[in-house]
Amino acid sequence: MTTHARPLAEYPVPGHQSRPADVIAGCALRWSWNGSAYNHLRAGIAIMLADLDDGDEIPLPPRTERPRAADLPK
Protein backbone atom coordinates (compact mmCIF):
# COMPACT_ATOMS: atom_id res chain seq x y z
CA MET A 1 0.00 0.00 0.00
CA THR A 2 1.39 3.37 -0.98
CA THR A 3 0.64 6.40 1.13
CA HIS A 4 1.50 9.96 0.36
CA ALA A 5 2.32 12.17 3.31
CA ARG A 6 0.66 15.55 3.39
CA PRO A 7 1.58 18.51 5.58
CA LEU A 8 -0.51 18.61 8.74
CA ALA A 9 -1.90 21.98 7.73
CA GLU A 10 -3.68 20.35 4.77
CA TYR A 11 -5.85 18.09 6.94
CA PRO A 12 -9.21 19.75 7.62
CA VAL A 13 -10.46 20.05 11.18
CA PRO A 14 -14.21 20.73 11.01
CA GLY A 15 -15.43 23.46 13.34
CA HIS A 16 -11.97 24.55 14.46
CA GLN A 17 -9.30 26.90 13.30
CA SER A 18 -6.22 25.28 11.83
CA ARG A 19 -4.15 25.34 15.00
CA PRO A 20 -1.46 22.64 15.19
CA ALA A 21 -3.11 20.93 18.17
CA ASP A 22 -6.43 20.79 16.31
CA VAL A 23 -4.87 19.44 13.15
CA ILE A 24 -2.84 16.73 14.90
CA ALA A 25 -5.79 15.66 17.05
CA GLY A 26 -8.06 15.70 14.00
CA CYS A 27 -5.73 13.30 12.20
CA ALA A 28 -5.65 11.00 15.22
CA LEU A 29 -9.44 11.11 15.53
CA ARG A 30 -9.76 9.40 12.15
CA TRP A 31 -8.67 6.15 13.85
CA SER A 32 -10.63 6.72 17.08
CA TRP A 33 -14.28 5.94 17.73
CA ASN A 34 -14.31 7.94 20.95
CA GLY A 35 -14.85 11.70 20.70
CA SER A 36 -13.42 12.25 24.17
CA ALA A 37 -10.12 10.83 22.93
CA TYR A 38 -10.00 13.81 20.56
CA ASN A 39 -10.47 16.28 23.43
CA HIS A 40 -7.83 14.67 25.64
CA LEU A 41 -5.33 14.44 22.81
CA ARG A 42 -5.97 18.01 21.69
CA ALA A 43 -5.58 19.34 25.24
CA GLY A 44 -2.33 17.45 25.77
CA ILE A 45 -0.86 18.65 22.49
CA ALA A 46 -1.92 22.24 23.22
CA ILE A 47 -0.13 22.12 26.57
CA MET A 48 2.97 20.64 24.95
CA LEU A 49 3.01 23.31 22.23
CA ALA A 50 2.50 26.07 24.81
CA ASP A 51 5.50 24.78 26.74
CA LEU A 52 7.62 24.81 23.59
CA ASP A 53 6.66 28.42 22.86
CA ASP A 54 8.81 29.47 25.82
CA GLY A 55 11.90 28.29 23.98
CA ASP A 56 12.31 25.28 26.23
CA GLU A 57 13.62 22.06 24.83
CA ILE A 58 11.82 18.77 25.22
CA PRO A 59 13.47 16.91 28.10
CA LEU A 60 14.89 13.58 27.02
CA PRO A 61 15.49 10.62 29.32
CA PRO A 62 19.12 9.96 30.17
CA ARG A 63 20.92 7.67 27.76
CA THR A 64 21.97 4.33 29.08
CA GLU A 65 25.19 2.88 27.85
CA ARG A 66 25.10 -0.65 26.54
CA PRO A 67 27.63 -2.93 28.20
CA ARG A 68 30.57 -3.95 26.10
CA ALA A 69 30.92 -7.62 25.22
CA ALA A 70 34.10 -7.82 27.31
CA ASP A 71 32.18 -6.60 30.38
CA LEU A 72 29.41 -9.21 30.13
CA PRO A 73 29.58 -12.29 32.36
CA LYS A 74 30.83 -15.42 30.60
Image (spheres, rainbow, N blue to C red):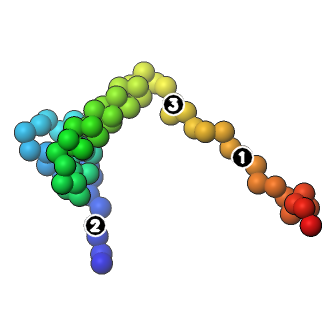
* Disc nearer the start of the sequence (1/3): 3
Which element carries disc 2, helix, strand or loop?
A: loop
Q: Is residue 9 visible?
A: no
Instruction: Identify which residue is drawn at 66% across, 39% down.
Output: 62
Is 11 displayed left or right of 54 in the figure?
A: left
Q: Secondary structure at mark 3?
A: loop
Could you tell me which residue is drawn at 30 percent across and 78 percent down? 1
How crowded is the residue under tag 3: few (<14 C-alpha within 10 Å), some, or many (20+)?
Answer: few
Mark 3 and mark 1 in contact (Cβ < 8 Å)? no
Q: Is residue 60 visible?
A: yes
Neighbour tally class for label 2: few under 14, some 14-19, many 20 plus, Cα within 10 Å:
few
Residue 21, percent from left and from top: 26, 37
* Residue 64, disc: 1
The residue under the point 29% across, 40% down is 41
Amino acid on which disc 2 is placed: His
Q: CA distance from mark 2 to mark 3?
A: 30 Å
Query: Sequence order check: which comes first, mark 1 or mark 2?
Result: 2
Mark 3 residue type:
Glu
Badge 1 marks a residue whose secondary structure is loop
Tag on residue 57?
3
Q: Is residue 27 above or below residue 60?
A: below
Q: Which residue is mark 2?
A: 4
Q: Which residue is at the front of the view, 37 or 49?
A: 37
Find the distance from the CA under tag 1 to the CA under tag 3: 20 Å
Which dot marks residue 73?
none
Which amino acid lies under the numbered mark 1 shown in the image of this protein?
Thr
